[in-house]
Amino acid sequence: MKINIFYILFLCVPLLGLSSCGGDKAQNKEETAHEEGEHGNESTTTLTAAQIKQIGLTYTSVSKQVLSDGLVLNGQLSVPNDKKAYVTSVFGGVLQQLFVQPGDLVTKGQRIGVLNNPDLIKTQEQLQLTNNQIRLTEIEVARQKELVEGNAAPLKRLQQVEMELANLKAQRSSLSKQLTAGGGSTQLSSQVSIIAPISGTVSTISAQIGSKVDASSPILELVNNDALHVDVFVYEKDLDKIKKGQKIRFSTVNNPNTSYEARIDQIGQAFETSTNAVAVHAQVLGDKSGLINGMQVQANLITSDNQVEAVPNESIVSFQGQDFIFILTDAHREEEHHEHGHGDEAEEHAHSHADQTAPEEQQLVYERISVVKGVSSGGYTSIIPTKEIGQDTKIVQKGAFFLLAKMTNSGEHSH
């Protein structure tokens, strides 16, 4: 009987061990599935609407760009002297009003300020006195004509009066032009209007309200950016690469991610003394928004018209020796909430929580795509993505670095 009992126990021990191992395997499998469910696709990450607003995320798309890895040129934006003007006053005086600020657009002949000059009143009084003398002299001319016709007065007297009238009219014309050309009024007033001599943008203001402005002293400067061009400097060894009609792509030093185009229309015929380089002039093409006279630029000579697919530089991020972009997918996710409970109580709590879900809890899904970078120029870089991207695909521009940091620092595997 004892032998049978031990025999039965000996058989049961392996069976208990098998049962325990099977339970561990099932538990491990469940944990692995749960972990995979938590991480999902290793190449994606999510943002809520609140996060998107907080980081100021913006989108761009793949565009065709003419990029060049050829000659790199430095220079600055400039406007010809005949398209720039200092605004002055003929009379001078105390600055009483100013109706413009730097950056404002004005048109030629526009009244942009007012000076106060009491000395004007003397000239205006003289003009009025001259007008009165003209009226009296005109009456005398008419009377002398009647006397001459009736042989009651000599012709010489009529000629003298007519000469006086002509001199008075010339004097009136001179006084009137002096007043109006300088911005003054022909009526009794000490105000002098400041008039814009050209159309353009107010670049600088050098006078303040209440300050005394001398005659012909600059009050402000106007620049007509419609004539904006780029002056780049080319060294002797590269002169043979430059020709009229060639295009250059440039960006300003303070905004390298925005590019512009210009066409070379003039090549200097003398070397600059300080740099031993030749100045090359190129007219800016298209939109000139954001460009100001005097800005420093970096330009690339466009040696061909071949277009490549490119994105703004800030859309590309690097991690562990690889380059990536992020695209907005069509997928959406809801934040997961793990509830614990039993029976009807758990079900009721889940329904209550679902009713209280805020709109911000819906998350947009962003996919990270590996790319191969090419030529960079004017704030753009050509790319070859490892996955096909449509022309309408939204690519993250501002905020790409945040997405990479979120993916690499939040424990979402080795993203």
Image (tube, rainbow, N blue to C red):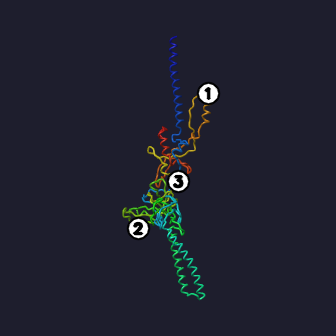
Q: Which residue is mark 2?
A: 269
- Work out whether 261 lies above or below 188: above
- Work out whether 314 lies above or below 89: above
Q: Nearer the viewer, mark 3 or mark 2?
A: 2
For label 1, the SS is: helix
Distance of label 3 from label 2 (alpha carbons): 38 Å
Q: Which residue is mark 1?
A: 343
Q: Nearer the viewer, mark 3 or mark 1?
A: 1
As drawn, the residue found furthest toward the top would be 1
Determine the residue positioned at 39% across, 67% down.
270
Other-residue count near label 2 (Cα within 10 Å), few / some / many at <14 / 14–19 / ≥20? few
Other-residue count near label 1 (Cα within 10 Å), few / some / many at <14 / 14–19 / ≥20? few
Please provide percent x and percent y for residue 176. Answer: 52, 72
- Contact between marks 3 and 2 (CB within 8 A): the answer is no
Q: Which residue is mark 3?
A: 63
Residue 230 - label: none
Q: Earlier in the sequence, mark 3 or mark 1?
A: 3
Please provide percent x and percent y for residue 340. Answer: 57, 29
Determine the residue positioned at 51% across, 76% down.
171
Please provide percent x and percent y for residue 203. Answer: 47, 60
